[in-house]
Structure formats: C-alpha cells, structure tokens
Image: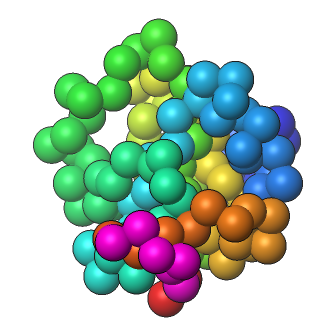
C-alpha cells in the first residue's frame, strides 16, 4: 500500500489479485459501456455517479479497492469513501495497467473483455 501523488491510499496492479484473495473487495466505478466491454470477473460495478446513493452497500468492516480506466475517477471515490471511515484504496493505473497482470477481464457474456 502506498500514497499516490494526491495522497490517496493506493495499491499496485500487480498486487490486486493477491489482495482480493485476502478478502479485499474490488469495486469498478466506470460507466456502463466500459464495464460491459471488459471488467474483472469478481468486481462489483457501482458507477462513480452512483456512489453517494449506493454507499449503504459498503460495509464499514470490509476493505475496498476502487478501480476505473486510469485511476483518476477511482482516486476521487477512494478519498470520498475514506472520509466516511470506510477503509478503501485506489488501484494505481486503473484497468489499463491491471490488464497487464491478469487474464480475468471478461465482457458481459464471460468472453475475453477489452478495456475501452
């Protein structure tokens, strides 16, 4: 775990799958078309614009990692969720970097997905 340039708690993409195995929950904050084209198989989809109204879905005792395409949107969401005393981290580099470390990016039908 590190702090990015905006002092947002962040994790490196090469560590993500190990952290998920340890119980961290991955939340993808990209828009519907981005999610549909390709997302990590075990991620939960909550678009950034829906975070405030969906905050009750997050359990205070859980640990969350937020992801978007490049890390900018998920950084903002991470800072917001942390302000509510819910432990969360941003995935540095977003899906663009993470796709280099996993083969588990799928589309809505479970086929190999792509990052748009």
Q: In this view, does 105 lie to the left or right of 1?
A: left
Q: Residue at x 49, y 55 (%)?
A: 41
Percent across and percent down for residue 36 are 33, 76
Q: Position of residue 71 (x, y in %)?
A: 61, 66
- Residue at 40%, 82% in the rendered image: 37
Q: Pick whichever, 28 or 36, lies toward us.
A: 36
| Image quadrant occupied by the N terminus | top right
Q: Give the range drawn in magenta.
A: 109-114
**Residue beneath the point at 53% across and 84% down:** 114
Q: Can the viewer see residue 34?
A: no
Can I make out residue 89 in this image?
A: yes
Q: Main secondary structure of the magenta part?
A: loop
At 82% from the left and 45% from the top, the residue drawn is: 15
Is residue 31 toward the left or the right of residue 78 in the image?
left
The one of 54 and 6 positioned closer to us in this rendering? 54
Examine the structure image and report whether residue 39 is included in the region drawn in magenta.
Answer: no
Image position of 29 (left or right of 57): right
- Pinpoint residue 27: horizontal percent, then vertical percent: 45, 47
**Where residue 17 sits: x, y (%)?**
72, 44
The colour scheme of the drawn protein is rainbow
Name the outermost residue toward the bottom.
Answer: 116
87 shown above or below 46? above
Q: In this image, 89 relative to 97: left or right?
A: left
């Amino acid at each position: 775990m590190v702090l990015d340039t905006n002092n947002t708690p962040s994790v490196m993409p090469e560590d993500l799958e190990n952290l998920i195995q340890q119980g961290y929950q991955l939340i993808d904050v990209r828009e519907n078309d981005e999610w549909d084209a390709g997302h990590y198989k075990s991620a939960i989809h909550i678009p950034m614009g829906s975070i405030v109204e969906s905050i009750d879905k997050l359990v205070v005792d859980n640990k969350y990692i937020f992801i978007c395409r490049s890390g900018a949107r998920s950084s903002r969401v991470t800072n917001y969720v942390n302000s509510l005393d819910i432990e969360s981290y941003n995935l540095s580099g977003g899906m663009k970097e993470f796709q280099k470390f996993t083969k588990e990016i799928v589309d809505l039908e479970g086929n190999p997905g792509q990052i748009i």
